[in-house]
Amino acid sequence: MARYRMNLMVCTGTGCVSNGAFQVRDALLTALREKGLQDEIGVVTTGCNGFCANGPIMVVQPEGIFYQKLTVKDVPFLVEEHFLKGRPVKKLMYIPPQEKAPVPKMKEIGFFGKQRLIALANRGQIDPENIDEYIAREGYRALARGLTGMEPVEIIEEIKKSGLRGRGGAGFPTGLKWEICSRNPARPKYVICNADEGDPGAFMDRSIVESNPHAVLEGMLIGARAIGASHGFIYLRNEYPLALKRISRAIEQATEYGLLGEDIFGSGFDFHVSVHRGAGAFVCGEETSLIRSIEGKPPHPRIKPPFPAASGYMGKPTNINNVETWANVPHIINRGWEWFSSIGTESSKGTKVFSLVGKVNNTGLVEVPMGITIREIIYDIGGGIKSGKKLKAVQLGGPSGGCIPADMADTVIDYDSVTKTGAIMGSGGMVVMDEDTCMVEVARYFLNFTQNESCGKCTFCRIGTKRMLEILERITRGEGKEEDIPELERLAVNVKNGSLCGLGQTAPNPVLTTLKYFREEYETHIREKRCPAKQCRELITYRIIEDKCTGCGLCRRKCPVNAISGEKKKVHEINQDMCIKCGICYQSCRFEAIKIADR
């Protein structure tokens, strides 16, 4: 293996890849060859670095120099200046919002400061398609210990004492779940990795699989040993082609190394894994729906009990955990339950991975210790709200979660504290909203998603969510009635209580939390036929301010329906009958000459 004086760690998570990371990597290899540096400087394609909005990202090791938003055109100059002449290129470094000076090193960037990596331990450090690099960083050591130095009951006890709770949403104690399944005498048994991540704005599981696929496999192997399973499934969304490629490659490599298959480590333990590609149905995140999908049946949830630990895949005992949960397991076995339990709060141990998105300066993938506050995540890691605007709310838990208002930003991140707000931890989606967000529209958006994704099996979910959505749509059009608010609350309670699975039981959460914390917005929409945030299209108009319009014509050229007219250097006009209220003119005007007004 070559020994380089320097390694260029190029992020090739989906976010960076979509912005040309592979092309940047190829350009680096070409430029290094042209300068005769190919034997001195290595190029490593890593998984997700986490700072997704700034990709493509490259970290120069061992210096720790952090480059962001690289393009193929940047590469020749960068190689010439930094790697040949030893002069780091400041203009390609990260500059924090409201600052002027670049931050040269990754460890000095606030985004990374308060994070603590467990599930994302190898983030940006290894090539996810090279098993040797995983092994070099303690990979499969926990498996060796679990197979040759621990009995199944000892593994389960270690996980129980650690306090690890399922990271898929419900937060059920992982060790207890394993113990229930292990005590079932029926054979064969199965383990499943739920990688069916369907929340809008969520990419935690995808990024872990892309960045550290062997950690997921190792966790599954240890869990399978603990409960006595011989086969496992990874249920992965078909919309994740890069994750599919890397987990498939990891399975091939682990099998080649004797870490999957028959008589692993000479222990007599056999385990095989297969990947099942999901078709993108949100309801398949529910465990019984997921199992039916693997069985080739329509993904309709069934009544529980029996739970999968008693009757799961093909009626046999089955244990399901999500990607993040499995990725935590090797670290607990390696370092002991005391270590893991020392992180977090009394009821929520360890860390949590979040996809931090929305109206925040630094969006991306973050892993934080339980016990950190929402405010710390948004301002210390996320760099605050974009354009200096005010925080209004945070949506936690995706479409099944709820909206937490700004005055509750000091809420601690743990299962119990978040649940008390009316939201849920969920799998880790965190959507930040600023003062320009309409909370009625937010509730409508998320309910529209869950209503579309309902499998339709039970009446409360199928019809109840439809009726709630109709009311919300009417309110956002300015056609709401006084009785709509109590009717929404009544329907929400009935849908929660009468639905068969978690989709219907949690679908009303965005409505209930926005009614609880932002009721006055609903009342304004209904009573005044006005959207305070000026976001509901039926309740606003776009108008040109005469004394600010320079007649540059940019808005006219950008308008997709030709609703704007006017001569050059003269005040323009918007035809209200033609305007579709897309907002493109407002976004493109350089002189703040377009305002959003009540209709």
Image (tube, helix red, strand yellow):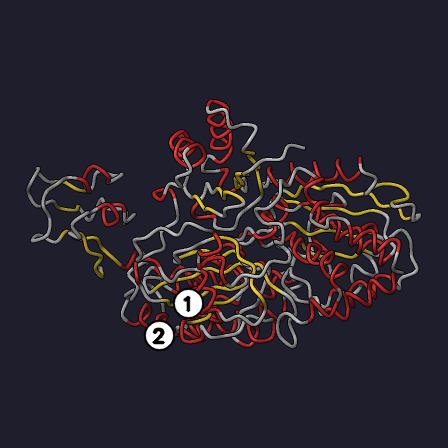
Q: Is residue 403 left or right of residue 148?
A: left
Residue 16 placement, left or right of 285: left
Disc 1 residue type? Ala
Q: Determine whether, in the image, residue 521 is placed left or right of residue 554.
A: right
Identified at 22% across, 57% down, the residue is: 596
Q: Residues within 10 Å of mark 1 (few under 14, many from 20)?
A: many
Q: Which mark is residue 570?
A: none
Mark 2: amino acid: Glu
Instruction: Name the one closer to the observer, 274 or 564.
Output: 274
Front residue (pair 381, 335): 335
Residue 470 visible in the shown view:
no
Question: Where in the figure is residue 401, as x and y percent of width and height?
Answer: 54, 65
Q: Residue 254 at x, y = what percent?
A: 77, 40
Query: Which quadrant of the figure contains the N terminus?
Result: top right
Front-lying residue, 558 or 66: 66
Q: Earlier in the sequence, mark 1 or mark 2?
A: 1
Query: Alpha-carbon distance for marks 1 and 2?
Result: 15 Å
Q: Which residue is mark 2?
A: 520
Q: Nearer the viewer, mark 1 or mark 2?
A: 1
Residue 148 at what x, y percent from top left?
Answer: 89, 54
Could you tell me which secondary element the residue under label 2 belongs to? Answer: helix
Q: Quick one: quadrant of the C terminus? A: bottom left
Q: Provide the residue designation for mark 1.
A: 393
Q: Position of residue 194 (x, y in %)?
A: 68, 52
What SS does tag 1 mark? Answer: strand
Q: Residue at x 64, y 69 (%)?
A: 343
Q: Which of these two is toward me, 567 or 120?
A: 120
